[in-house]
Image (tube, rainbow, N blue to C red):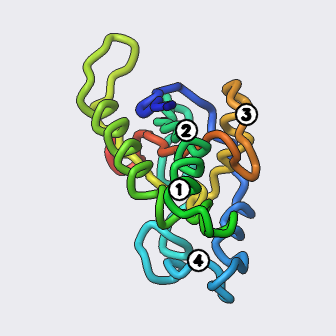
Amino acid sequence: MINLSGIIKRIEPVIDYSVRGLCVKVYPGHKKGCPNLNHKDGCPPNAGYFDKVYDISKPVYAIINVFDFKSHVDKMRELHPDWSQRQLDCCLYWQPKARKQLFEGIKKFLTHNDKERFKQGYRVEKCPEAMGVEITKTLAKAGIALEWPPVNVVYQVALAGIPYDTL
């Protein structure tokens, strides 16, 4: 079982405002895209652009959770042998556990004291794509290749930066 919650890596965010278009992309059961669009503060159009909210000339960190998706799907297949692949992959069954792991990583980032980084003033964004950060390219620049669609692992990424309003 893979549990790599809380990988913390200094990154250079790839800014691409068009990535916010993923929020309006139609998917099964959601003809208008993500139901949080226009409703949740951290979602478009309410979310600001990352490079307008955060000073990207200062260190930016990715807090990365690696969730063992394959083990989850195998376990669900064992429990529900009659389920379709879509039901086995459904995010409703794996996201709560994965999010909990990501939050543990965020807590570790905000509370861990080390000499390499000075975290006073850092704020964490749990949905950087909503702010125009292209996470796939950002992680690729940092040497991490994402699986699309995920088969073995799912990466959840939060970004930590220093907002302009705290400078």
Give the CA separation, mark 2 to mark 4. 27 Å
Q: Quick one: 36 or 53, which is closer to the camera? A: 36
Q: What element does badge 1 sit on?
A: helix
As displayed, is residue 53 above or below residue 139? below
- The disc at residue 145 is 3
- The disc at residue 56 is 2
Give the CA separation, mark 2 to mark 3. 22 Å
Q: Which mark's residue is nearer the viewer, 1 or 2? A: 1
Query: In this view, which residue lies farthest toward the bottom?
Result: 31
The answer to whether marks 1 and 2 mark residues whose Cβ atoms lie closer than 8 Å is: no
Question: What residue is rendered at 69% in x and 63% in y?
Answer: 85
As displayed, is residue 18 above or below residue 73? below
Mark earlier in primary sequence (2, 3): 2
Give the CA separation, mark 1 to mark 2. 41 Å
Q: Residues within 10 Å of mark 1 (few under 14, many from 20)?
A: some
Q: Which amino acid does label 2 sit on?
A: Ile
Disc 1: which residue = 76
Q: What element does badge 2 sit on?
A: loop
Q: Where is residue 84 in the image (x, y as percent from the top left)?
A: 68, 69
Numbered marks: total: 4
Q: What residue type is labelled 4?
A: Cys
Q: Which amino acid does label 1 sit on?
A: Met
Give the CA separation, mark 1 to mark 3. 26 Å
Question: What residue is rendered at 59% in x and 30% in y?
Answer: 11
Q: What element does badge 4 sit on?
A: loop
Left or right of 123 in this view: 57? right
